[in-house]
Amino acid sequence: MKVRRLIPAPRRALAGALVVLGLFVSGGSGCRDDSDAFKKADLGRALTERGEPERGVPLLKEAVSMDPGLTMAHEVLADTYASLGRYPEAVAEYRATVKLDPVRDSAYAALGCLLLATEGATEEAEAALTKALEINRTHAGAHACLAAVHLDHQDFSNAIGEGERAVSLDPQSVQGHLTLGIALAETGERARARSEIERAIALSGENPAVADQARVYLQSLEHPDVAGGPAGPGGAAAGELH
């Protein structure tokens, strides 16, 4: 039997929310070095952070070509691809990053969240997020995305627990508040759900698509027959994973 999705909108919106919420911010390069590859990668990162990711990509690719073992270059290239919406390439670079550095929590978290956003709650997504939290229990982004994984599996209790941890660690987490709100709604806690979703809307000003999706769900709390809402068409009782 196929897993049934609560509503498709939050996962689609999540891809757009990730960059805004800073999940694709590399955890640093470790020890700096004076190699030409590192210098190119550092310049590529600076361009991306300055809002010029298109100019950063060629430098980062050149850095990776010059030194395939330079973990920082792979991770920043992944961040940059993600910021440009080039998600398959970003996933490939995050995979390369964690292969080179098996304890890089930032890359595991970004990989898991991005897989969740683009492919759903796959085993690889859940494993990456779990690994990120084994390394760093205080990674709010990983908790928020793991909450969404549990939500996909209709495991509302764990979704609420992970969502609460996410917003406790990072009160500005849009994913955390939104996923927590949806999970609360599905368990009948409509007042708390409304509060969390309203908070997500208030925090998502830089990402109107996410805010719009959250408003649809908020409306469904008042009108349960709205498609995608709790117990409405496309809600917990309909809408297979696809």
Image (spheres, grey):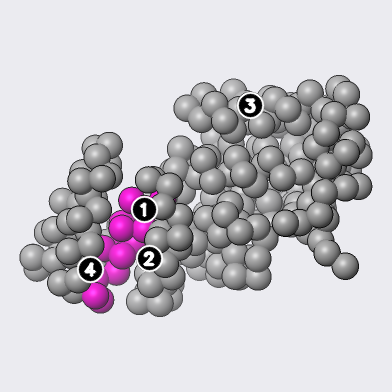
Residue found at x 62% / y 49% = 144
Residue found at x 79% / y 52% = 5
Left or right placement of residue 51 versus residue 62 in this view: right
Task: For mark 4, give the secondary structure.
Answer: helix
Q: Quadrant of the C terminus?
A: bottom right
- Could you classify mark 4 by the number of other residues whose Cα lies within 10 Å: few (under 14), some (14-19), or many (20 or more)? many
First in residue order: circle 4 vs circle 3: 4
Please say if the residues under marks 2 and 1 sit with CB atoms less than 8 Å apart. Answer: yes
Span of residues in magenta:
68-82
Measuring from the top left, give residue 72's x and y in whole percent: 28, 63
Magenta stretch prevailing secondary structure: helix
Task: For mark 2, give the secondary structure.
Answer: helix
Q: Find disc 4 in the rendering and name its residue.
A: 64
First in residue order: circle 3 vs circle 1: 1
CA gap, disc 1 to disc 4? 14 Å
Measuring from the top left, give residue 149's x and y in whole percent: 69, 57
CA gap, disc 2 to disc 1? 9 Å
Q: Find disc 1 in the rendering and name its residue.
A: 81
